[in-house]
Image: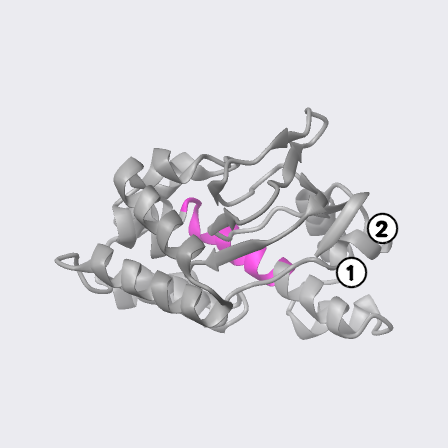
Amino acid sequence: MELGRATLTWAIAARPHQILNINLAEPFRVRINCGEANPAPDISVAGPLTDRRAYVSLSGSIHAFHILFQPTGLNRLVGVNVRSLVNQNPAVSDVLGPKSAAALGDAVRMAPDFDQRVAAVERWIGTMLEGRDSDCPIDLASRQMIAARGAARIEDLVAESGFSASQFARRFEMRVGMAPKLFARMIRFDRALIARREAPNRPWTDIVHELGYFDQAHFIRECHAFTGLPPSGLVGDWNNVFCPDG
């Protein structure tokens, strides 16, 4: 889009996602809580947000390509401990290394259209995954949690994994970036925001009941924890939410 001198700003709630951002035009600016708004790197990784809100500002010529990873995707791709990315927005070169980051950036920028950018990224990911391990029980468990909209019983996932509870928790935090229970809470809250975005006139009480919150007070506490606002404050700029499918 072309914004010229206008500035488009929106808030981002705490969320579990790992996103790789490639700016093809002017970089956006990111402000965490009450800090200063700083330009994002040309290619950056947005790690999970757990207890802080980010504000993204766009202006000028906006052209960006985003890769949304499955919960353990970055760990499997480059072996990074995802806990190091929580509440961070580092340059991709700091996560992937300069050579891999440059190869990805060049491949996306040289592609003439969206479909060919997707194909270029898939080729790059295929090269990066050569020789790496296949899915592990933590990968499967995290995807099951998304498919269940955060309602999967963690005790059952631990039993299916073959790990002890402590091993499961430790490996989960390394590969996903947070404890299993926090991940489940974030998935459910993300789904609540999505449900409200898709049906703006739908009462919060219906959404809360559908997603299995204990009661309205439970949801209000979660809302304050992840956005700093009550449900009535989630209007307008809070519509920019998304979550990968299971």
Q: Give the mark, 2 or 1, whose residue is nearer the N terminus.
A: 1
Q: Which residues are magenta?
A: 177-189
From the image, tell me which residue sits under label 2.
233
Q: Is residue 66 left or right of residue 208?
A: left
Between 163 and 60, the one nearer to me in the picture: 60
What amino acid type should be assigned to the residue bearing mark 1?
Gln
Judged by depth in the image, the label closer to the viewer, 2 or 1, is 2
* Count of numbered tags: 2
Between 59 and 204, the one nearer to me in the picture: 59
Within-10-Å neighbours for mark 2: few <14, some 14–19, many 20+: few
What amino acid type should be assigned to the residue bearing mark 2?
Gly
Query: Mark 2–mark 1 contact, CB under 8 Å?
Result: no
Q: Is residue 126 visible?
A: yes
Tag 2's secondary structure? helix
Which percent across, then down, holds residue 221?
72, 48
From the image, tell me which residue sits under label 1.
216
Tag 1's secondary structure? helix
Which residue is found at the position 25% from the left and 53% from the top? 164
